[in-house]
Image (cartoon, grey):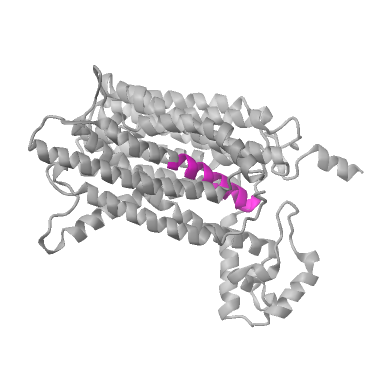
Amino acid sequence: MEIESSSINSWDGYRDWRSRPALPGRHGGMLAASFVLVVEVLENLAFLASASNLVLYLTKEMEFSPSGAANSVTVFMGTAFFLALLGGFLADAFFTTFHIYLFSATIEFLGLVVLTGQACAHSARPWARGVLFGGLYLVALGVGGIKGSLPPHGAEQFDESTPRGRKQRSYFFNYFVFSLSCGALVAVTFVVWLEDNVGWQWGFGVSTLSILLSVPVFLSGSTFYRLKVPSGSPITTLFKVLTAALYAKYCGSKNSRNAVMAMETGSSSRETDDSEETKPISDLGFVEEALTDQRSLPRALQCTTQQVQDVRIVLKILPIFMSTIMLNCCLAQLSTFSVQQASTMNTKLGKLTVPPAALPVFPVVFTMILAPVYNHLLIPLARKATRTEMGITHLQRIGTGLVLSVVAMSVAALVETKRKRIAVSCGPSNSPLPITFLWLAFQYVFLGSADLFTLAGMMEFFFTEAPSRMRSLATSLSWTSLAMGYYLSSLLVSAVNFITGSFGHSPWLSGDHLNQYHLERFYWLMCVLTGLNFVNYLFWACRYTYRASQN
């Protein structure tokens, strides 16, 4: 009775911020997660306020070439998102998400202080560039740690053993994207205006103040948080199992059936986790080799069934992760070329002239509208229609986003064809074309919808499906997909220009003016590639079996 009472009154594997047992009713829940949502608004404001207008800062103030500035920003943002893997790894292995956030926010704050001081110096000398990049990569390190720890920290506040907890967790991921958009809206409007009209140091100063304010907001929720206890390095487990499987397959004996029977009867020596769903050993695929005749393996490579199951789950979600990179490549492409398109078009709304750099406002605002509608209208309708707990499964959400990315690229190609036709009819001119920039809003609306479906779906899918020992690391794959999309974008542009410029032809994406580009052809190419990517996604998604219940 005492054991049962203890299990009811505390959550196994969770502690509060003072390392005491986390208690149902006192820790976790939507109240605790709401602090995370507010913090994300401030954190994303700080990051995007310093990054969204960075290209102009590098070209105007630091005397970079346009290509050099673009490459520097791409590498900076890609690095920041890649470093989310480091933050997720540390949160799973050694520290809690609570401590990783505080440490990362401190690093980002220091980086922004350096950038603010450098902007105040008004110097483009080599020493100033060194200070600039030192500050930028401190910010990248801090952002990576925050992106890798904050989403799983919020998701861990919900009790996944109950339908109510699982539904609230799904709401949380949608509103996390909403919070991202709130921070982005302030960054690309007010802060960009401040940088352009008052001074760059003021923009960096707002970023510094924003990340500083996020810390007391985060700490104010300390008494409500429940923290997942770290359980050792997931990377070590991953490499150990894969190495053991390869060793057993090519160097060990082949008495797999006897070994499996020995493992089943020797369960007392096996590590288990009651919270994880166990699967038959015969269903473990290639990594089953790690369980065959363990007496032939070196002692350091001997694995438990649970470790092999965990690695198998990770290998299953990797094809889904790879299928999302193309969507983020589309986002990167449109964020650059669409601004250049708008600069040739009529950007007036009545008496107001809208700067082309303000175009990201369209997807941001649309996402802010769609997220509550999705949570409170679409999902309840889907639950009634399907009579399931989730209404729409994680993979269906990601797939919807990928379909919308195909539509977005086809719309982008049609709009560019229309713009190009008008440009040809008007002839060479420096005046804005007689076509409103609002035509570009259509592709942004579709891409904003795709981002909401895919990003929120990815984070929830990776968090839910990953083993509990590596959830922060798995959730970080969402940001890694974004980073790889940025890098693939640069590679794709270079590859297209190289191929289309061969044999004496003019490259598609080269010329003195955008009207000399064949941008519509490039968009159609992207449309085809995203379509093929969706087919590849369907191949893996249709064969995926959920570890957790989706009913």
Q: Is residue 279 visible?
A: yes
Report the magenta residues as a range: 450-476
Q: Position of residue 17 (x, y in %)?
A: 67, 34
Point out the residue furthest to the top here.
351
The residue depicted at 29 percent of the width and 43 percent of the height is 412
Decide which of 207, 393 is in the foreground and name it: 393
The residue depicted at 87 percent of the width and 45 percent of the height is 3
| Image-based side of 216 in relation to 126, left or right | right
Decide which of 283, 96 is in the foreground and name it: 283
Q: Position of residue 38 (x, y in %)?
A: 54, 27
Q: Is residue 96 visible?
A: no
The N terminus - image quarter:
top right
Decide which of 75, 461 is in the foreground and name it: 461
The residue depicted at 57 percent of the width and 59 percent of the height is 544
Q: Position of residue 20 (x, y in %)?
A: 74, 36
> Is 464 covered by the magenta stretch?
yes
Q: In the image, is residue 425 above or below residue 118?
A: below
Q: In the image, is residue 134 above or below residue 498?
A: above
The quarter of the displayed image where residue 431 is located: top left
The quarter of the displayed image where residue 380 is located: top right
Q: In the image, is residue 119 above or below residue 257?
A: above
Point out the residue furthest to the front here.
385
